[in-house]
Amino acid sequence: MGDADLITASALARVETVIRAQLQAEGSISEDVATLPVNVSAWRAAARRVAKSLARPTWTGLDLRGQVVWAELADWPATADEEARQRAATRRAIPGFPDVE
C-alpha cells in the first residue's frame, strides 16, 4: 500500500467516524463538498457502509448545485429515544412548535 492509499484510508476512516456519530445522533448529516477530505462518491459510499453496519436503510444524495452532500437514515426515527430527539430538534429549529406527544 502506497502513501496515497494510506492517506485515503485514513481520511475515509475519519469520514466514517463523523458520519456514524451524526447518523446515530440525528439521523442525518450534510457536508459542504468543498470541505470534504474525500470525493463525493467516496463520501456517499462511506455513508452507505456506515448505515449498513448499523443495520439501517439509508438515502444519500447531492444537492442540485453540487455543493452539499447528504445522508439520511430512511427509517429515522425508529425508536422512542430517536423520536424524542427528533421532537426536541424540531422544537429548537421552529420556535413555537407545539409540544405534542
Image (spheres, helix red, strand yellow):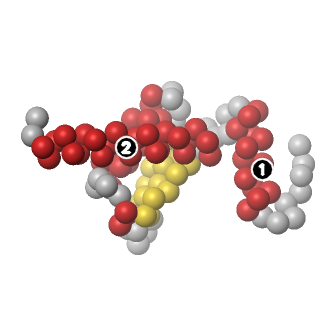
Q: Do the residues labelled 1 and 2 touch (CB within 8 Å)?
A: no
Q: What residue type is labelled 1?
A: Ala
Q: Is residue 87 above or below residue 63?
A: above
Where is residue 49? Give x, y as percent.
Answer: 39, 35
Q: Quadrant of residue 75?
A: top right
Q: Distance between the residues labelled 1 and 2?
A: 28 Å
Q: Is residue 36 above or below residue 9?
A: below
Q: Residue furthest bottom?
A: 65
Nearer to us in this view, 61 or 30: 30
Q: What residue type is labelled 2?
A: Arg
Q: In this view, does 69 lie above or below 12?
A: below
Viewed as shown, does residue 4 lie left or right of 46? left
Q: Quadrant of residue 76?
A: top right
Q: Can residue 48 be seen in this view?
A: no
Question: Residue 66 has which mark?
Answer: none
Residue designated by label 2: 14
Name which residue lies at 47% across and 35% down.
51
Q: How crowded is mark 2: few (under 14 residues within 10 Å), some or many (20 or more)?
A: few
Query: Considering the image in quadrants, where does the C terminus appear?
Result: top right
Q: Quadrant of residue 34?
A: bottom left
Name which residue lies at 35% across and 58% down.
36
Q: Which callout, 1 or 2, points at the residue further toward the start of the chain?
A: 2
Residue designated by label 1: 88
Where is residue 94? Give x, y as percent.
Answer: 78, 64
Nearer to us in this view, 11 or 44: 11
Q: Residue furthest left?
A: 2
Per the image, label 1 sits on a secondary structure element best described as helix
Q: How many labels does the image show?
A: 2
Name which residue lies at 25% across and 40% down.
9
Nearer to us in this view, 24 or 65: 24
Per the image, label 2 sits on a secondary structure element best described as helix
Where is residue 16? Give x, y as percent.
Answer: 40, 41
